[in-house]
Amino acid sequence: MRKFVAYTLATGLTAVALLATVNCGDTQVAASTTANGDAVKRGEYLVSVVGCGDCHTPLNMGPQGPEPDMTRFLSGHPEPVGALPPAAAQGPWLWAGAATNTAFAGPWGTSYAANLTPDRNTGLGIWDEKMFVTAIRTGRHMGTSRPIMPPMPWPAIRNASDDDLKAIYAYLKSIKPIANHVPDVQPPAAPVATN
Ligand code: HEC
């Protein structure tokens, strides 16, 4: 059930359109700084196309409706909002999302979009490239431990090439670090007796 929910939510929520890596033919990239610069650029492009910010950048209410808070770009569920009380799905509804679109409650419990900025203590600061690629490929927290919960669309993003995942990592490491501690996933609330 969990696997099914994870898969359908992840694939249903995000239209992931990772383009095939462009082969530069016989153009050799000499300086490694240039190669890294190219990776950062491609990573920026991929992050914008996949829409990582849809869940990892919190929404604020603006004059035209909800808009991403770019002062908290990709820094995950806002620390001042913190952990939320469990939300029980009712009637035909299976899951619920917070107003910030960074916290999600469903049969898996309550998950909070991670801080993807390179902040050392609260973001991807201590992650290396291998951990990042393994986490996305295996759906395991930091590449080794607990399962990564919905709606993180790792079952779709894992289809990216190694080069593209490395480019996403290079870009995320290049953005502004933002200290924002995100709560860990909470288990589902115990079912309430109805009779
Ligand atoms: C539909 C919402 C959504 C989208 C889109 C999304 N994420 Fe996530 N992501 C989440 C949630 C929710 C979590 C927290 C899951 C958990 O704690 O188990 C998460 C967690 C993560 C983690 C932490 C994994 C770990 O080991 O704990 C990484 C890294 C990550 N996302 C990267 C990305 C990247 C890169 C993209 C875009 C290519 C992206 N996410 C797009 C919702 C999303």
Image (cartoon, rainbow, N blue to C red):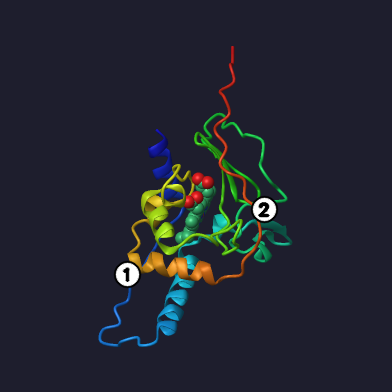
The quadrant of the image that shows the C terminus is top right
- Circle nearer the N terminus (2, 1): 1
Q: Quadrant of the N terminus?
A: top left
165 displayed left or right of 104: left
Toward which corner of the image does residue 190 lie, by quadrant?
Answer: top right
Where residue 165 appears, as percent x and y from the top left, is 39, 64
Q: Which residue carries the number 1 mark?
A: 20
Q: Looking at the image, is 52 positioned above or below residue 150?
A: below
The residue that appears at 45% across and 67% down in the rendered structure is: 168
On the image, the x and y values in percent for residue 152 come to 48, 50
Q: Which residue is mark 2?
A: 78
Q: Look at label 1 and name its amino acid.
A: Ala
27 shown above or below 128: below
Q: Nearer the viewer, residue 100 or 172?
A: 172
Which image quadrant is residue 61 in? bottom right
User: Does 166 appear above or below 189?
Assistant: below
Which residue is at the front of the view, 74 or 138?
138
